[in-house]
Image (cartoon, rainbow, N blue to C red):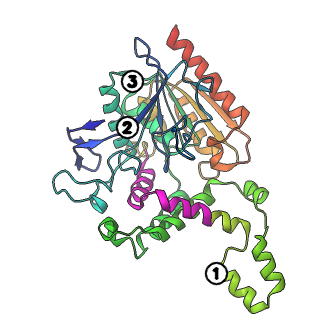
């Protein structure tokens, strides 16, 4: 969907003649009361469910959650996935052309915030004629967007579901993001963000950024269970049969351990499809999000604007978005006497748990949406 009118951003800049890519699932009912907005995380998109015909590995990133008969049942709800501005999956971003200059935006694409994404999503819903959402839902960065919806447009949201998220990033989280960004901007192929004109991609930086990120998404238990200290077959042969010198040279150049090979594989894949400037923009938006900042750090005061009902879910081994961060939100909402449900799932998978099949987790979401559907049809 194209938007000609300028979108005023939190930074004071504006963006005009931009487009948002989106997908819808299910059927909007007559009074348009069954719409559910899905907000995506860092490297995801508007393709949240289903499979593209004729394409390999084109399954939606939350396909286990959304669809006919699934926890978010598209036989009951009209589900909308919107690709965030600045992304590299269809919505206007750094790789698109500036309407005034005709040049690719590159590093000149304006800084974005979670609040800017929510504002643009509201514009798209306006165009679809949807005034009130039955629910807004997201995991990780998507959960931050869901929370922001309840503060920016409290009258337009009946329920908010925030999964494996936080009211802001800790210093440790910001540090991980900064190391990943430095890997990208110091890549010789980055060219100050204008690598498009040079016909190159800063793949080395993207690989390292993804490897850093991937470490934080997994728990120590899962890493040990999946990989432990296992050597790759070739590495085991070299280190066993070769001389100490040749074995050392192999170890400095090649991935010896299974975990090294896995991380390199993930980094290689990521560098083939993700945009470096998008990574910088999105991680900065993560860093900036802090609704309590303008209230002297008082989260209870900040969340007083929210009027909808909430479900928050966290996972015990998620050390990047730890359960205590979700509990901060729960406490702030209870301070304001809001209707809050909270589930803390004892799962071994770390932050990635919000994308995986855990019967207890999926059961909680299914039960909550059954409640939402009763309200919609009452």
Quadrant including the N terminus = top left
Mark seen at residue 253:
1
Distance of label 1 from label 3 (alpha carbons): 55 Å
Above or below — where is 43 with respect to 257?
Answer: above
* Secondary element type, mark 3: helix
The region drawn magenta spans 264-290
Q: Which residue is mark 2?
A: 118
Mark toward the start of the polypeptide (3 vs 2): 2
Q: Earlier in the sequence, mark 1 or mark 2?
A: 2
Give yes or no for contact between labels 1 and 3 (Cβ–Cβ under 8 Å): no
Where residue 238 sits: x, y (%)? 78, 81
Relative horizontal placement of residue 198, taking residue 289 as reference (left or right): left
Does residue 276 belong to the magenta stretch? yes
Q: Residues within 10 Å of mark 2 (few under 14, many from 20)?
A: many
Please give left or right for residue 306 compared with residue 72 in the image: left
Residue 364 placement: quadrant? top right
Q: Which mark is residue 38?
A: none
Determine whether label 1 and label 2 are within 8 Å by CB.
no
Q: Magenta span has 218?
A: no
Residue marked by disc 3:
156
């Amino acid at each position: 969907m194209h938007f000609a009118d300028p979108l005023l951003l939190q930074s004071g800049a504006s963006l005009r003649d931009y487009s948002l890519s989106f997908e819808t699932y299910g059927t909007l009912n007559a009074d348009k009361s069954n719409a559910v907005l899905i907000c995506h995380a860092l490297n995801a998109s508007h393709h949240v469910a289903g499979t593209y015909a004729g394409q390999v590995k084109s399954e939606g990133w939350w396909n286990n959650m959304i669809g006919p008969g699934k926890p978010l049942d598209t036989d009951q709800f009209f589900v909308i996935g919107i690709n965030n501005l600045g992304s590299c999956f269809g919505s206007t971003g750094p790789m698109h052309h500036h309407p005034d200059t005709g040049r690719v935006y590159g590093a000149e694409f304006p800084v974005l915030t979670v609040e800017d994404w929510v504002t643009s999503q509201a514009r798209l819903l306006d165009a679809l004629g949807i005034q009130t959402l039955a629910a807004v839902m997201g995991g990780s960065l998507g959960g931050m967007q869901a929370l922001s919806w309840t503060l920016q447009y409290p009258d337009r949201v009946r329920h908010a579901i925030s999964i494996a998220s936080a009211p802001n990033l800790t210093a440790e989280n910001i540090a991980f993001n900064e190391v990943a960004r430095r890997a990208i901007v110091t890549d010789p192929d980055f060219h100050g963000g204008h690598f498009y004109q040079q016909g190159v991609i800063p793949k080395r930086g993207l690989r390292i950024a993804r490897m850093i990120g991937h470490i934080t998404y997994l728990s120590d238990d899962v890493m040990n269970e999946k990989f432990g200290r296992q050597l790759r077959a070739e590495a085991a042969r070299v280190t066993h049969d070769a001389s100490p010198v040749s074995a050392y040279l192999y170890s400095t150049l090649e991935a010896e351990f299974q975990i090294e090979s896995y991380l390199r594989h993930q980094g290689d894949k990521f560098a083939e499809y993700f945009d470096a400037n998008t990574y910088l923009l999105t991680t900065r938006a993560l860093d900036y999000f802090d609704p309590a900042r303008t209230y002297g750090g008082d989260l209870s005061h900040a969340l007083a604007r929210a009027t909808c009902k909430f479900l928050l879910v966290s996972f015990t081994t998620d050390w990047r978005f730890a359960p205590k961060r979700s509990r901060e939100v729960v406490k702030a909402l209870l301070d304001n006497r809001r209707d809050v449900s909270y589930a803390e799932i004892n799962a071994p998978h770390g932050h990635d748990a919000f994308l995986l099949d855990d019967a207890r987790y999926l059961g909680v979401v299914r039960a909550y949406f059954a409640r939402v559907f009763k309200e919609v049809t009452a």
